[in-house]
Each structure stands twice: as C-alpha cells, then as structure tokens.
C-alpha cells in the first residue's frame, strides 16, 4: 500500500504560505475596518484609524496642516486665479506633487472628489458649507473648527483626525518653548511694549489683522503683549473694518501691518501706509511701524506661527526700541 505521507506533507507546505497570506489579509482588513471617533464642527464622525486616501477641501486651512504632519492627501481644493491658474496657497516648502486639484475652496467639485475614492474628507468649518451631507455620502467627512479659537487647538484636532498626535505634540512643544523664550527675553519689557496689528481692507479702510483667530492671534494671545483697546478680545466683532480716521485709536509703541500681496505690491497696503494719518502715528514718527510679509504668517500650521515669532523677535528684541512711544493711559476706552 502506497503511503500518502509525502503527499500530505507537500500539501501542508503549500498551504502554510496561503494561510499566512490569509492572515495578513485579515490583519489588513482589520486595520482598514478600525476607526476612531472624532467630534468636530459638524457633529461626531467615525473615521478610519489609518486613512489612506484623504481629500482636503481647503488648502491653507486643511491641506497645509496635514502636510506639516507628514500626511499627503491624494487631492485637495485650492485657489483658482483670475487667469484660470490653480494653486494650493501657503504650502511653499511642502511637496504637493501628485495631489489632484478638485475645485476651488468653498466650491469643491463633488464628482472629482468621488472619483478619488477617498476614505476620509477633511476641511475647515467653512469648506463644507452646505454640502456636508453630500460629502458624507462619499466618505466620512470631518470639519475642523479653525477660526475663533487658538490655532494650537485646531492643529491638535487635525492631528487626532489622522492619528498623528505624537508629531503634533512635538511641534507644539517646539512652539511653546519659543513662546516662553521670547517672554523671558523680553522680561519686564513684555508688559510695557504695546503692539498694534493691522491689515489693509477695502480702499480707505483697515482691520485688526488677527481677527478670527489663527496664527497671529494665537501668538499674540500666548505672549500677552499689551494691545490697543479696540484690539482686545471682544472689543469689536471679528473683521470689523475701520475707516482711516480711526487709525489714531490703533496707535501703539509698535505698529505692524500685514502685506498679503506677495511679490506684487498690495495697493491697499500702499494706500494705508502712505496716508497722512498713518504717517502721523506716534509709532511711525518714532520709526517703529513695520510692514511684514503676511503670506508667511497666514495658514493653519505651526510653521506659520513660527514665522510670525521670527518677525516679533526681530522687532521687539531690538535694543534700540523705544517702549514709551505711547502713553497707554491715553488710549480711548469704550469707542
């Protein structure tokens, strides 16, 4: 009688790799099925624990923070210029090659998004607009609140959505250390150096540059620098436009104006800084009004807060800075 032992052994040897492969597939399936619960601006959503095909609905407030965390979405909405050009704002220094463009932020192309077969859609609170239900039918959709709170909180939320909390904690520790170092370097001068932060608005107007939160707001809040009364928390509604006649109410030891024109001069900034009232500010007469590149300090990223800290360190640690340009007791109250 012929023994079947060699045949059985051969079958077992052949089956081992197959069984192992099945085990790997099972593990992969389990990983794909694993989820985390995220509470966000639109509610509570179960998202993949390890998302592999992410679509961002906003460039500087969704794509950027993900790239900083080392996560590269497969697609993102962005800016469509007047000439039809397409770009992802504030992502300089990050690799955006291969990221598909799926429409303008605020007006994403749902068909283009669905074609990417995403397993997760990420946005700020405004990027989903009234399309949240439709987007959620394509893939789990999370809207992180970016505005009207410290950016540090929003960035930690982005990290939780994609499971990169450890990296975010590292970035936060670096940021916290810089804040504490600048506060220590300023010492007693911290409480006696007032700072006004402005951006040009429509022609003949301006607004407080760090309205609504984000990078500059967070840095100014964490440093605790004195601000003109109209720039204090809750003094006016976010993005309130002031006429140039109100510039004297925004005078301070240091006045900083954001220029968002990039390489091209911003006509609004030119009109602001060349106005008679701006030139007559005590900070300007003391040579302590500054125009900085606002594009480097806008966007949801630790790097954007770091860029603003670079500017503040350059300005505020100047040994020749006059910290008594403005008598804060003269600031108007209740206007």
Image (cartoon, grey):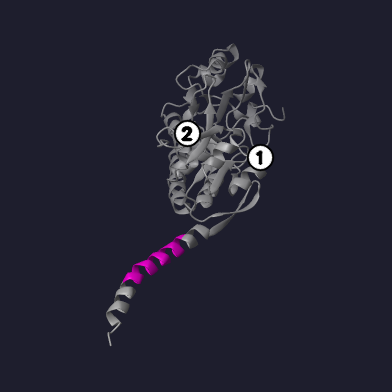
Compared to residue 251, the image places residue 192 above or below, namely: below
Contact between labelled residues 2 and 1, with CB atoms less than 8 Å apart: no
Residue at far bottom of view: 1
Mark yes or no: residue 222 visible: no
Sequence-wise, the earlier of marks 1 and 2 is: 1
- Residue visible at 33% across and 75% down? 12
Quadrant in which the C terminus is drawn: top right
x then y, percent, for residue 192:
53, 34
Residue 228 lies, in percent from the top left, at: 61, 30
User: Can the viewer see residue 278 in this picture?
Assistant: yes
127 and 227: which is toward the camera = 127
Q: Is residue 25 magenta?
A: yes
> Which residue is rendered at x = 54% and y = 58% of the image?
35
For the residue pair 210 and 94, the one nearer the viewer reads as: 94
Disc number at residue 308?
2
What is the C-alpha distance between the residues marked 1 and 2? Answer: 34 Å
Q: Within 10 Å of the Cα at label 2, are there few (<14), some (14-19), or many (20+) other Cα atoms?
A: many
Q: Which mark is residue 131?
A: 1
**Which residue extends farthest front?**
1
Task: Check residue 117 for magenta coloring.
Answer: no
Q: Main secondary structure of the magenta part?
A: helix
Q: Residue at x 66, y 46 (%)?
A: 42
x and y percent of residue 313 in the render? Answer: 43, 33
- Bounds of the magenta span? 14-28
């Amino acid at each position: 009688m012929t023994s079947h032992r060699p045949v059985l052994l051969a079958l077992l040897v052949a089956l081992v790799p197959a069984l192992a492969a099945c085990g790997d597939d099972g593990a992969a399936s389990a990983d794909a099925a694993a989820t985390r619960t995220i509470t966000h601006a639109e509610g509570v959503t179960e998202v993949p624990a390890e998302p592999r095909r992410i679509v961002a609905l906003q460039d500087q407030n969704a794509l950027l923070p993900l790239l900083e965390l080392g996560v590269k979405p497969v697609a993102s909405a962005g800016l469509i210029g007047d000439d039809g050009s397409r770009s992802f704002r504030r992502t300089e220094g990050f690799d955006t090659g291969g990221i598909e463009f799926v429409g303008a932020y605020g007006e994403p192309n749902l068909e283009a998004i669905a074609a990417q077969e995403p397993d997760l859609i990420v946005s700020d609170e405004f990027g989903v607009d009234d399309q949240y239900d439709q987007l959620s039918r394509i893939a789990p959709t999370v809207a992180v609140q970016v505005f009207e709170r410290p950016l540090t909180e929003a960035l930690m939320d982005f990290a939780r959505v994609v499971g990169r909390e450890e990296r975010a904690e590292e970035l936060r520790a670096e940021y916290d250390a810089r804040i504490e170092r600048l506060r220590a370097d300023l010492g007693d001068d911290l409480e006696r150096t007032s700072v006004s932060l402005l951006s040009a608005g429509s022609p003949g107007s301006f607004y407080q540059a760090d309205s609504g939160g984000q990078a500059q707001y967070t840095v100014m809040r964490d440093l605790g620098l004195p601000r003109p009364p109209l720039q204090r928390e809750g003094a006016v509604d976010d993005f309130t436009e002031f006429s140039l006649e109100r510039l004297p109410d925004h005078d301070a030891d240091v006045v900083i104006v954001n220029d968002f024109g990039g390489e091209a001069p911003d006509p609004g900034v030119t009109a602001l800084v060349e106005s008679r009232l701006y030139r007559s500010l005590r900070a300007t007469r003391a040579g302590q009004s500054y125009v900085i590149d606002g594009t480097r300090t806008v966007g949801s990223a630790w790097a954007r807060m770091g860029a603003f800290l670079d500017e503040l360190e350059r300005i505020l640690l100047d040994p020749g800075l006059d910290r008594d340009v403005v008598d804060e007791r003269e600031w108007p109250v209740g206007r």
